[in-house]
Amino acid sequence: MNSDYINIALADDDEDDRLFFTDAFEELKIKSKVSTFEDGIELMEFLENSNNTHPDLLFLDLNMPKKSGLECLVEIKTNDRFKNMVIAIYSTSSSEMDIENTFVQGANIYIKKPNNFETLKKVLSEVVTTNWQYHTNGLNKENFLLRL
Amino acid sequence: MKLLLKFDFTNVCNRLLEEKLKAHHVNYRQTAFGEITLLETVSEEQMKAFQNDINFYGIEILEDPKNIVVQKIKDVIVDMVFNEKDVNVKTSVYLAEQLDQSYSYLSNLFSEVTYTSIENFIIIQKIEYTKLLLTKEELSLTEIAYKLNYSSVAHLSKQFKNTTGITPSAFQRIISKRKENKEN
Amino acid sequence: MNLTPNNYLKAAFGIGLFIILCIGGFTYKHIQSLSESSKTVKSTYSVSSELAKILSNLKQAESGHRGFLLTSDSIFLDPYFSGVTQLKENLGRLDTLVPENTDQRKNLKKLKSDIEKRFSIFKRSFGLVDDKLILSEDLLYVLHEGKMSMDQIRKDLVNMQDLESRLMAESQVKNEKAMDLTPLMFFGILILTLILLLLAYAKMNKDLMELKDTNDDLVVFKKLTQQAEKISHSGTWIWYVEEDEFYYSDNLFNLLGVEPNSFEPSLEKFIGFVHVDDREGLGQQINKMIKEEDLPLVTFRIVQPDGTIKHLKAFGKLIENAFEEKQLIGVTVDATEEYENFKLIEQRNQELERNNKELSAFNYVTSHDLQEPLRKIQTFISRLEVKDKDNLSEAGNICVEKIKSASARMRLLIDDLLQYSRTNKTESDFSETNMNMLLESAKQELIDSIEEKEAVITSQNLPTMDVISFQIQQLFINIIGNSLKYSREGVPPKIDIKHEEVISSEVEELKDSFIKHYHKISIKDNGIGFEQTYAKKIFVLFNRLHGKTEYSGTGIGLAICKKIVDNHNGVILAEGIPNVGAKFIIYLPYLK
């Protein structure tokens, strides 16, 4: 088991959502380092700087100004440097078409933002656990699809 | 041209380990899959160099005895699921037999170390295997359910959906669309 | 080819010529026979006169001879010799007059020999006279003999005269006969010619009338064409291929914005009017037209001298006229109005599309954006509930509960509304899909409640259809979900799905459809059913048959189903019997 903390990033333009997110990780007591970004541009600038450590798990809101989550997803997926990054879509949309499309574009996880803080905690914990299982048990990342 | 590959992970891991141990001049004997006994003392420096080398391939040396047991449990389960072992007895009995420990001990230990249950781990492995069969072997869900000893297709379907949040058909569709996208 | 006026004329001319030639032939023949008969008459008279002269000369010679015999005075010999000489001349002339090998010739011969005999008698008598001055016995005998010879000659002459008269009479009879026929003939021919002339005149008159009528029609037609051209804003043109000459109708000039016939029509001149940007394209079409002698529909713009831009359409067709000359006849139409109308419609369509898009975007955005604050409310309440539950009064907790349930209800509504507004029709989303797969996916989505209710779903094999797969899957989910939800207490749901192909004319609800074949998919359950009177109402947005507390729901699920089926140009119907079950029938077009 990896004794290091898990590196998590979230790109979401909604301040409240970022707050819920970081609070949830704090309360979950998962050994993690959470960094947040206000939009896609800010996120991509961070990622493209090779001095920064890449997040293990990246949460992307779809609806963001300047650069949408989907655009970020496509960019990340076409860059070989980020191929080990697990990408979770974190969005309000529950459109089946949107969901399937993000999966097809390479997202591993799709989370519909929950309406309940406790649910959010549960969902995030499940994501981290599943991710960890994929990480530690050598499961095929290609088949890593999770919808919550 | 496109090649579909099937790996014998056990073989690959054993070969790799063998090569690396030889490269570091370590005298050893393999006692089980994922378990070797060193036949002579190894210096700390030599050990570190070896550890760094194999870390690159995602192989870790487990030092905690608890971890070792958990890893053994996992290995037995993966072997059981992926090699379609015909296990007549309950999995709990099978695990206890294989590891020569009581199931409640193993179960507690597993939960303590992994934050998840053995049952859950088995489900995850079965679903993983289902995914593999769905995409690589292109078997139908009915065939898979039969192969994995599920009582019904509905049961497998339900478990798949509960574990991954998506239905087997959606999964199959997504993977095949990804392939299409890559080919274009 | 049929008889054209041209050939008629030729035939009439031929017949006329033939008849005139016949008339000429007949006339010539008649005149010839007339002149022949007059010749015969003339020769008969000549012969008669010669014969008379012969007799008189003979008489003169005889009287001279008698005188000499009486007187022996040689003075009497003069008339004798002149009579002999003239007689010889007469005989010579007769010889030429009487044709050879005829009866008359024989007569002449006899006459000649008789005359010679007479003369030999004369000579003999002269011999006798020299010796004796009186009438001797011999002389008397000779004289006697002379008289007999003379009688014979007279007889000969009469014979000849008779024959000649007879010949003449015969010829006259023949002539008269011919002369009798001639006027009749001439008259007949005259009448015939007259009839022919009349016929030709009538025919020509008729043709002329027809020609005039046709001409009148042509004039009217031309006027009509001109009017039609004016009203339809079109012009016509002819390209005489062999001569490479053009004819433009007046209105074609008008279309170009110039006075009719203000220039000699030619290709180059025309191209001069064409909009610079369209010249190349039209040039290619015209080159093709010249090569293939055919002009398919082309559109191009022209610039009138005053700068007005017009959109024109042209179309040509090759014909061959009566003289086998090639002509490309064409019509050029001012399509400016059409083009502008099209533009306008396109603009309106775009507007409509934009409005529709805006409307659905508005729908989507409102429901989508409403989600955010609602989610925040719910999340904050959940935090309040967990963290500060104990700090709140009982009333406060009740309030929190109320807020929670109200916001949960709102969430349900918004989610369904969102789904409803998302159920749009985009042609590109249609694809050939195996309906069994969609049904399977729907069943997988509903697996939890199927297991929970122990529902049994049976289905026939479904075909592959051209559908929006997400929507049809949603349709199955909603209808089967509906059946699961409205199941009877304690009765495990049994859902039966059937498929068949139907012909629209045989189905009441599809009678007005112009699509012939439909897929009929029916989904039947054994649930609580409903009163048939509500069969239409249940598809209306926000319409619910049950109280909120009995069954949760927003009344959107079936409205979404209807929208989905509408998107596929289909029909959805519901049949229900309370406490027996409900049946949903979906008709989707089957384009074979």
Image (cartoon, rainbow, N blue to C red):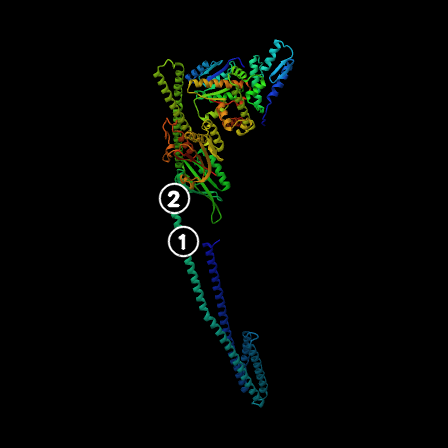
- Tell me residue C441's x, y (percent): 48, 29
Q: Residue at x 44, y 61 (%)?
A: C196
Can residue A10 be seen in this snapshot? yes
Give whichever of discs 2 and 1 has the lower sequence position: 1
Crowd class of label 1 (few under 14; some 14 to 19; many from 20; radius 10 Å): few
Name the chain under label 1: C
In the image shown, does C328 or C48 lie closer to the viewer?
C328
**Residue receiving disc 2:** C226
> Residue C210: which numbered mark, if any?
1
- Above-or-below relation of C554 to C324: above
Taking depth in this image into account, of A28 and C51 the one nearest to the observer is A28
Is residue B183 shown to the viewer in this render? no
On the image, the x and y values in percent for residue A113 come to 44, 20
Furthest residue to the top? B44
User: Which quadrant would residue C136 be assigned to in this image?
Assistant: bottom right
In-front residue for pair B170/C64: B170
Identity, as a three-letter code, of the amino acid under mark 1: Glu
The amino acid at mark 2 is Gln
Q: From mark 2 to mark 1, how far is it between C-alphas?
A: 23 Å
Q: Image height check: is C246 above or below C496?
A: below
